[in-house]
Image: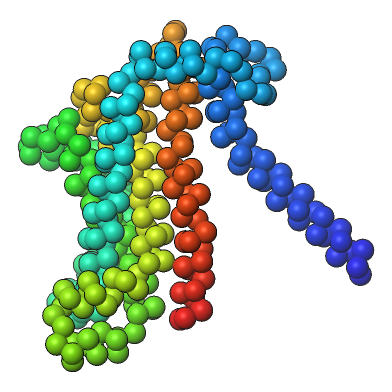
């Protein structure tokens, strides 16, 4: 019996290790290829260790793109999108979870139904609306339409409905707190795990968004990083080393955010489950 358990444990660790290697390999080779020139990247076999062309690739990247401007635009759009989603989705989720009002079920059903629609269906309507508002080639055309996602509203509604007792809200009302004060001072501080999850999902989604900038952005200075890096590709003369360098730098903010938030996120979710 013990031998069978040892074999099962070894097989489980082997599968986990193989899966981890498959997940890590794309990130590793992105950083490796960022240090090699284009001619070496397509060698057979490809390079498996870091090279000596990192600085030349970086200089070429800065020559081909207004890279720091694009990086700043991505940070600005992702930060604004995340902040607006955390505020508006928590407000909407609080309303759906605690208040009774006319057409509440129907409105929430519309929110859920919007999650099932493919994102490409709103490309043309979004462009028409942004054009009518005069927001083409403006960063607000990226973060305002994404300010209250259906997934965030659903997450907040479910978390507030299950983790925050109605008695706590009623007690705050009896103490004379207004509705917004109850939300801001009582409910919002208890939403840490849900806000952390939603913030991480929203930031990564906004950072990686390619279609929306492609539709509304016109000038290279206002491109976000995914669109700017895609503009470096051509059928005949793609500097893959510089492109990999840009991709490696673009991954760093996501890796840093995940590294610093993952442990706190898991701990917050676990403690919330224990309290519930």
Q: Residue at image x 22%, y 86%?
A: 172
* Relative height, residue 27 to residue 62 (above, below): below
In the image, residue 218 lies at what x, y percent?
Answer: 20, 24
Q: Which of 143 and 214 is in front in this view?
A: 143
Q: Viewed as shown, does residue 180 lie left or right of 224?
A: left
Hey, which quadrant is residue 179 in on the image?
A: bottom left
Q: Residue at image x 24%, y 60%?
A: 87
Q: How is the image coloured?
A: rainbow
Q: Viewed as shown, does residue 115 lie left or right of 264?
A: left
Residue 92 at least partly seen: yes
In the image, residue 71 lies at what x, y percent?
Answer: 33, 31
Hey, which quadrant is residue 154 in on the image?
A: bottom left
Quick one: quadrant of the N terminus? bottom right
Q: Residue at image x 59%, y 15%?
A: 52
Q: Residue at image x 22%, y 67%?
A: 91
Q: Which of 24 and 113 is in front in this view?
A: 24
* Relative height, residue 93 to residue 204 (above, below): below
In the image, residue 110 lies at what x, y percent?
Answer: 24, 62
* Relative height, residue 136 to residue 265 (above, below): above
Q: Viewed as shown, does residue 245 lie left or right of 118?
A: right
Residue 113 at least partly seen: no
Tally of marks = 0
In the image, residue 111 lies at what x, y percent?
Answer: 27, 61
């Amino acid at each position: 019996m013990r031998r069978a358990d040892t074999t099962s444990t070894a097989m489980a660790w082997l599968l986990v290790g193989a899966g981890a290697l498959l997940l890590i390999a794309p990130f590793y080779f992105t950083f490796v290829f960022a240090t090699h020139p284009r001619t070496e990247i397509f060698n057979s076999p490809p390079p498996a260790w870091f090279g000596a062309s990192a600085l030349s690739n970086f200089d070429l990247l800065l020559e081909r793109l207004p890279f720091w401007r694009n990086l700043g635009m991505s940070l600005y759009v992702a930060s604004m999108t995340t902040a607006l989603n955390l505020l508006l989705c928590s407000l909407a989720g609080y309303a759906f979870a605690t208040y009774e009002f006319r057409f509440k079920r129907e409105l929430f059903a519309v929110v859920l139904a919007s999650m099932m629609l493919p994102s490409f269906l709103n490309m043309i309507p979004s462009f028409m609306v942004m054009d009518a508002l005069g927001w083409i080639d403006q960063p607000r055309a990226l973060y305002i339409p994404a300010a209250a996602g259906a997934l965030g509203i659903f997450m907040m509604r479910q978390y507030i409905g299950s983790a925050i007792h109605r008695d706590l809200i009623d007690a705050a009302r009896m103490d004379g707190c207004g509705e917004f004060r109850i939300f801001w001072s009582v409910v919002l501080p208890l939403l840490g795990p849900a806000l952390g999850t939603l913030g991480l999902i929203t930031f990564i989604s906004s950072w990686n968004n390619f279609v929306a900038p492609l539709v509304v952005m016109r000038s290279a200075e206002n491109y976000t990083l995914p669109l700017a890096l895609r503009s470096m590709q051509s059928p005949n003369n793609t500097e893959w080393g510089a492109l990999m360098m840009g991709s490696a730098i673009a991954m760093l903010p996501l890796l840093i955010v995940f590294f610093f938030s993952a442990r706190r996120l898991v701990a917050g979710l676990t403690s919330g489950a224990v309290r519930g």
